Every structure is written in structure tokens, then in C-alpha cells.
Amino acid sequence: MQQLTPEGQRIVSDLSQRYGFSPDAVTHMLVAVLHGNGTMAQFCHPEFAGSGQWMRGGMLMLGDMFNNVLKSNVDALCNEISQILANQPGLLSTGSFQSQSQSGSGQQSQATGASQATSSLFVPNPDDHWWPTELGAPTSLGSQNNVRYAYFAGNRRLAVKTGDQVWVYDTLDHQIGGFSQQQGGGSSIVFSSQYGTINLATLPVVSQNGQPQQAAPPSVESVQPAFNPEPVAVRQSSDVEGTNAMPSQGEDIIDQIARLGELKDRGILTDEEFIAKKTQLLERL
């Protein structure tokens, strides 16, 4: 359970005295409403008749369903906690994204950033703030298996943690709505945006463990593209211009192949994906 600050303890004590529940029960409900982003709660405590659910607007389910006095007190407590949390700047958020595994066996979770934000009620947990501090508060959070995600829509950044490694990506103009891990001979991470399903490896890397990285130009290929733009013909004004452009294009393709090799070494690309993309790039020469 999250540790309360002195201010949080004072609020819990006040609620305990006014509603007749123990500080432990009130703290339990405070965390439950927080995890429900201030609008709902799933709880399990003896003073609340065991397991139950609350939703702002009047829905309440208790184990002791005929105890109207208890139901009234629990509903009032939850509503006041909801209001307290709403008055904490940055504690509650409306953004969230889905994460899933195509194998169907991966453990996954999603969050809105509520439990991660700094407030006067809870002592910050360093493990909950694993991304670079300059990114601020995330728009949305998620995790799956041993991979954690933090999306910062305003900064156009995506932080991904795998083990002890924290990578920060430039999301370009993508509006990210969810993540998944594709299983097979290896595994790769993809995300959904307004352009379809995109491989994470196509995004430019901004930093690794706080160290700036020189990002290669990202590939525009997607795993399941939502659209196929028509090729644009580029007119060269002279044969000289066309001749001068070739070495630059060749160097760019070589740089991209080297970048793909780095991604394969880090386990983001499978061997099959690396070979396929390398072949596609070589065909452009």
C-alpha cells in the first residue's frame, strides 16, 4: 500500500472520525478510489462487509446488501474521497492506453497516471517514476510482462523500460492509443496510432538511460499499415543532380541498415524482421 504523507494522514484521520471507520479502512478506500481514477473503486475490507464495488453516481455493491446504514456511510466516504482526489493537481488523469499480447498469455495492465503523479497525499515511490524527470507527468501508463510504457503526448515522447534499460523515443506526429507484443521466433513491440499498427523500431531514439542517442531516420514501414500512400515522382532538373543524389541515398540506406542491426541486437527486432527490412532497403540501391 502506498505510504501517506503527514497531510495524507491528517485527511485519513479526519475522515475516520467523521464516518466511524478505522484509519486502516479509510486508507484502504482512499487507495481503491485512487486506482479507480476517482470515479470508481473495488475494495475488500472487513469494515466494508468484505468485497464490494463503488461507482460515482449511485452504484454501490456490498457484501451486506441489506445494511442501508453501512451503504450510506460507504457511499458518502467514497464520494468525499473522490472530491479530495479531484482537488489534487495532476493526481487524476483522463488518458489511458491498452496493452496486449498476441499470444494471449502475457500479463498486462493499464493506468491513467493517477498513482504516478506527485501529490500532497502520498510519498512518491521512486520505482513509480522510472522515466526521465524532464518529461514531467505522463499522459498515460501501461505495462506488459517485463515491459513498462509511459506516453507523454504533449512532449511527443514515449518512454519504454525493459529490465534496467530506459529508452526514450520521439513519437513524431503519432497519436498513440495502445501497445502490444508480438510473439513468435522472437518478440517485437508495436503500437497503434492514427496511421495503423506501427513497429516501435521505426521511431527515432532520443536517449538511452539518460544518454542522448543519435537517431537514424525512422522507417515509414508499418506492420499493418492503415493506408498506402501513392508514390510521389521526384523530378530531377538535370542528369547531374540525379547523379549527385545517389551517393547520399546510398549512405542513408547504409545508415538505416546499421540502425536496424542495433535494434536487432537489443532484441527489439527479430532476426526475420531484420532480414526482411534489410532486403527491402538493399533493393532501393
Image (cartoon, rainbow, N blue to C red):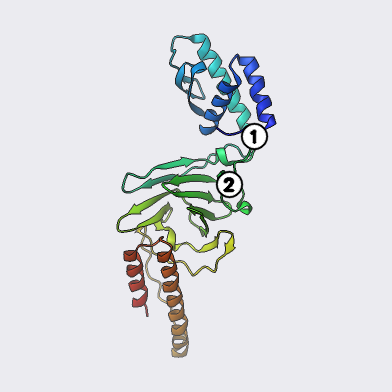
Which marked residue is nearer to the observer: mark 1 or mark 2? 2
Q: Is residue 195 visible?
A: yes
Ranked by sequence position, the earlier of labels 1 and 2 is 1
Residue 88 has which mark?
Answer: 1
State which quadrant residue 280 falls in.
Answer: bottom left
Q: Residue 95: x, y in percent?
A: 52, 42
Question: Disc 1 on helix, strand or loop?
Answer: loop
Residue at the front extreme, as displayed: 164
Residue shown at 52% from the left, 25% from the top: 56
Q: Is residue 61 visible?
A: no
Q: CA distance from mark 1 to mark 2?
A: 18 Å
Residue shown at 43% from the left, 16% from the top: 63
Residue shown at 53% from the left, 18% from the top: 75
Question: Disc 2 on helix, strand or loop?
Answer: loop
Residue 129 has which mark?
Answer: 2
Q: Residue 250: x, y in percent?
A: 43, 81
Q: Is residue 22 left or right of residue 59?
A: right
